[in-house]
C-alpha cells in the first residue's frame, strides 16, 4: 500500500467511524461552526484543565466525509496537548492545507504525524479546504471561548 492509499483509507475510516464524537460532558469551553456552502455543522467541546492542557475534546455535528474526518483526526491529535501545543498545531495545519508546507514531526507521535499528514492532499481541492479547516477554526474559537459561531465563508 502506498502513502496516498494509506491517507485515503485513514480519511475514509475517520469519516465513517469518527472518534470522540458526541458531547463531552466535562467541557468547559465550546464553539460552533457552519459551512453554508455545503451544510457542514460542527460543535467542538473542550475540557481544559488548570494547566491549560486539553484533558478531553469531542465534537458533534454533520457534514461531508472530509469535514467529519478532519474533526475526528483533530480531536485525536489535540487530546492531551497543552493549549500552546494545540495552537501551534492549528497554525501548522493551516499552513499545510493552504500553503502546502510539510508538517514537522516535533511534538507528534509517528501515528499522529501520519493522521495529520493524511489531510494534506485536501489543499489540492480548493472547494474542500473549508470543509477540512472548519473544525480547526472552531477549535480556535473554543480555546478563545468565543460564542460567535464560525462561518466558513467569513474566514480565510
Image (tube, rainbow, N blue to C red):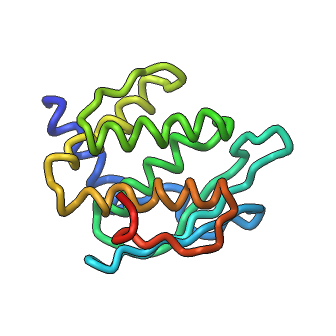
| Residue at left offset 39%, top offset 62% | 155
x and y percentages locating residue 78 in the rendered image: 56, 42
| Residue at left offset 21%, top offset 47% | 123
Q: How many marks?
A: 0
Q: Is residue 85 left or right of residue 55?
A: left
The answer to whether residue 59 is above or below residue 105 is below
x and y percentages locating residue 136 in the rendered image: 46, 54
Q: Is residue 151 left or right of residue 7?
A: right
The answer to whether residue 9 is above or below residue 43 is above
Task: Determine which quarter of the picture holds residue 98.
Answer: top left
x and y percentages locating residue 64 in the rendered image: 29, 69
| Residue at left offset 59%, top offset 74% | 148
x and y percentages locating residue 53 in the rendered image: 73, 40
Q: Quadrant of the N terminus?
A: top left
| Residue at left offset 40%, top offset 29% | 113
The residue lying toward the viewer, choosing from 138 and 61, is 138
Q: Is residue 149 left or right of residue 134?
A: right
Task: Determine which quarter of the picture holds residue 107.
Answer: top right
Task: Determine which quarter of the picture holds residue 111.
Answer: top left
Q: Quadrant of the C terminus?
A: bottom left
The answer to whether residue 50 is above or below residue 140 is above
Amino acid at each position: 500500500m502506498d502513502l496516498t492509499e494509506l491517507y485515503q483509507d485513514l480519511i475514509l475510516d475517520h469519516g465513517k467511524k469518527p472518534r470522540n464524537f458526541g458531547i463531552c460532558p466535562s467541557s468547559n469551553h465550546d464553539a460552533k461552526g457552519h459551512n453554508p456552502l455545503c451544510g457542514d455543522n460542527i460543535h467542538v467541546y473542550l475540557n481544559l484543565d488548570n494547566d491549560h492542557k486539553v484533558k478531553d475534546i469531542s465534537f458533534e455535528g454533520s457534514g461531508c466525509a472530509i469535514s467529519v474526518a478532519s474533526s475526528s483526526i483533530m480531536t485525536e491529535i489535540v487530546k492531551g496537548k497543552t493549549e500552546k501545543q494545540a495552537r501551534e498545531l492549528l497554525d501548522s495545519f493551516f499552513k499545510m492545507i493552504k500553503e502546502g508546507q510539510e508538517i514537522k514531526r516535533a511534538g507528534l507521535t509517528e501515528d499522529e504525524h501520519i493522521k495529520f499528514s493524511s489531510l494534506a492532499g485536501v489543499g489540492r481541492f480548493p472547494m474542500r479546504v473549508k470543509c477540512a479547516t472548519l473544525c480547526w477554526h472552531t477549535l480556535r474559537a473554543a480555546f478563545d471561548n468565543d460564542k460567535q459561531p464560525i462561518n466558513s465563508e467569513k474566514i480565510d
